[in-house]
Amino acid sequence: MGERAARVAGDVQEEKESRPPEVVLASILASLRAADSARERSELVRASLHAMARTVTAVIMFALLLCVALLELTIGALKWGSCPVSPWIPLWLVVSGILGILRNVSGILFSVLKDNHRSV
């Protein structure tokens, strides 16, 4: 792989998924246009697809974890005081759901703040 392609692929890998999707796509297209040979283009495409696959996987996992936290909170609130097994189960579900939502929201905020810090 040429030195230029290695440098561009390294840049794509360093910035990873912390940028908005439209910025990532623009960067990938600019890198592909800058590639000199077919081999460099194929290496760039491979690195870009890998980065995009990681982004999609992270978004799907984040969405699933957020859904689980929302379900815990909802079920705990609906069954509050009426659980036939133990009165502590709905309380545990509510607390766990709130903590899960806070964890996911704080992850988004830190990611956005980190991205804003990089772009300045």
Image: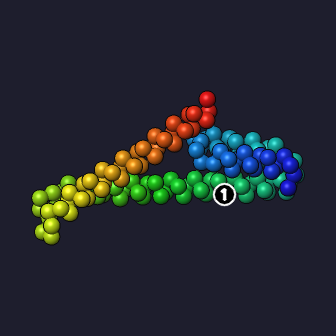
Q: Is residue 6 left or right of 83 when viewed as pictured?
A: right
Q: How many marks?
A: 1
Is any atom of residue 3 visible in this view?
yes
- Viewer-side residue, 48 vs 33: 48
- Callout 1 amino acid: His
Q: Report which residue position mark 1 lands on.
A: 50
Which color mode does the image show? rainbow
Q: Quadrant of the N terminus?
A: bottom right
Residue 56, position in %: x, y? 56, 55
The residue positioned farthest toward the top in the image shown: 120
On screen, 21 above or below 38? above
Q: Is residue 82 left or right of 53 when viewed as pictured?
A: left
Residue 102, position in %: x, y? 36, 47
Residue 94, position in %: x, y? 25, 54
Q: Quadrant of the C terminus?
A: top right
Q: Residue at x 34, y 55 (%)?
A: 69
Q: Residue at x 42, y 58 (%)?
A: 64
Badge 1 marks a residue whose secondary structure is helix
Q: Which of the 4 image quarters holds residue 67?
A: bottom left
Is any atom of residue 74 visible in this view?
no
Q: Residue at x 67, y 56 (%)?
A: 49
Residue 106, position in %: x, y? 42, 44
Q: Residue at x 46, y 46 (%)?
A: 107
On screen, 4 above or below 65? above
On screen, 34 above or below 95? above
| Mark 1, other Cα within 10 Å: few <14 / some 14–19 / many ≥20 | some
